[in-house]
C-alpha cells in the first residue's frame, strides 16, 4: 500500500517533528545553569523570610533587666562620691567651714556695695577722755533725694547739736538704698551721736574718708 492512497493528516505532521530512533534529543545550553540560578534567587528570599520571623518575635528582656539590676550595686560601689579620699573630704569640710571675709575697701560713692553694720539709734556714743564727744570734726551732708532744702535742714540739726564744721551739698554717684551715715574708724563716737539726732538706722564704717558723711535719699 503506497502513501499516495492516504492524504497527510495531523498525525503524520506530528511524527515529522518528533525525533526518529532511540536517541534522546539534545538539551538546551542553559539547562545546566538552571539549578544555580534558582539557588541564587531562592537563598536570599529564605534569609529575608527568616529575618522577618526573628524580628516579629523579640527575645525576652527579663534576663537583661535582671542582669542590669544586679550590676547597679557594683556601679554604685565605684562612684566618685564613695571613693573620695580622706584628704579630699577634709579639704571640702575646711572650705565649707571657712566664711567669706567682707570687703570694706569700696569708695563712699557706691554705698550699696559697701559692708553695712547697722547699730541701734539709741546706742551710747564713745566719749573723749574729758567725758564729751569731740564735735570739731567735719561733717558732710549730701542730698541724694531730689528734695530741695533737705540737706540744709539736716545741717541745721547737726549744728544745733554743737558741730561747727558742717557742709551741705548735692550727692553725685551711686546712692544707697536708704539714708546712711558713713564714718571713719576714729569718728565712731561722732557718727553714733549724729545717728541719735537724725534717727537714721544705717551706720557704716568706711575707709578712705575723714570725719562723718551723711547721704540722704528720702525725707527724715
Image: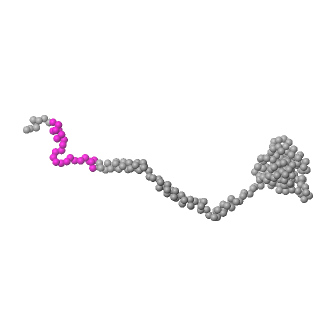
Look at the image and tell me whether residue 42 can be seen. yes
Q: Nearer the viewer, residue 82 or 191?
A: 82
Q: Residue at x 83, y 46 (%)?
A: 142
Q: Which of the image's four quarters has the N terminus?
A: top left
Measuring from the top left, give residue 19's x and y in whole percent.
18, 44
Measuring from the top left, give residue 108's x and y in whole percent.
79, 51
Q: How is the image coloured?
A: one colour
Q: Nearer the viewer, residue 64 or 81?
A: 64
Vertical arrangement, residue 82 with respect to residue 199, above or below? below
Q: Residue at x 14, y 36 (%)?
A: 8
Q: Is residue 114 left or right of residue 58?
A: right
Measuring from the top left, give residue 160's x and y in whole percent.
91, 48
Q: Residue at x 54, y 59 (%)?
A: 73
Q: Which residues are magenta?
A: 9-32
Vertical arrangement, residue 211 with respect to residue 219, above or below? below
Q: Residue 187 lies in what quarter of the image? A: bottom right
Look at the image and tell me whether residue 173 can be seen. no
Q: Is residue 76 left or right of residue 163?
A: left
Residue 12 among those drawn in magenta:
yes
Residue 112 among those drawn in magenta:
no
Q: Nearer the viewer, residue 122 or 34?
A: 122
Amino acid at each position: 500500500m503506497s502513501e499516495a492512497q492516504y492524504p497527510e493528516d495531523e498525525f503524520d505532521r506530528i511524527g515529522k517533528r518528533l525525533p526518529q530512533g532511540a536517541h534522546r534529543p539534545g538539551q538546551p545550553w542553559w539547562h545546566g545553569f538552571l539549578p544555580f540560578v534558582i539557588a541564587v534567587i531562592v537563598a536570599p528570599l529564605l534569609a529575608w523570610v527568616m529575618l522577618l520571623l526573628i524580628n516579629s518575635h523579640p527575645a525576652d528582656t527579663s534576663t537583661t533587666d535582671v542582669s542590669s539590676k544586679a550590676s547597679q550595686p557594683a556601679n554604685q560601689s565605684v562612684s566618685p562620691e564613695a571613693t573620695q579620699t580622706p584628704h579630699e573630704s577634709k579639704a571640702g569640710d575646711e572650705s565649707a567651714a571657712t566664711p567669706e571675709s567682707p570687703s570694706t575697701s569700696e569708695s563712699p560713692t557706691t554705698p550699696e556695695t559697701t559692708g553695712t553694720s547697722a547699730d541701734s539709734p539709741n546706742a551710747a556714743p564713745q566719749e573723749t577722755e574729758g567725758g564729751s564727744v569731740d564735735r570739731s570734726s567735719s561733717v558732710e551732708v549730701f542730698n541724694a533725694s531730689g528734695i530741695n532744702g533737705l540737706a540744709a535742714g539736716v545741717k541745721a540739726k547737726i549744728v544745733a547739736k554743737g558741730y561747727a564744721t558742717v557742709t551741705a551739698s548735692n550727692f553725685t554717684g551711686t546712692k544707697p538704698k536708704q539714708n546712711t551715715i558713713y564714718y571713719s574708724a576714729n569718728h565712731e563716737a561722732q557718727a553714733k551721736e549724729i545717728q541719735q539726732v537724725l534717727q537714721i538706722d544705717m551706720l557704716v564704717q568706711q575707709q578712705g574718708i575723714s570725719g562723718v558723711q551723711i547721704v540722704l535719699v528720702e525725707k527724715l
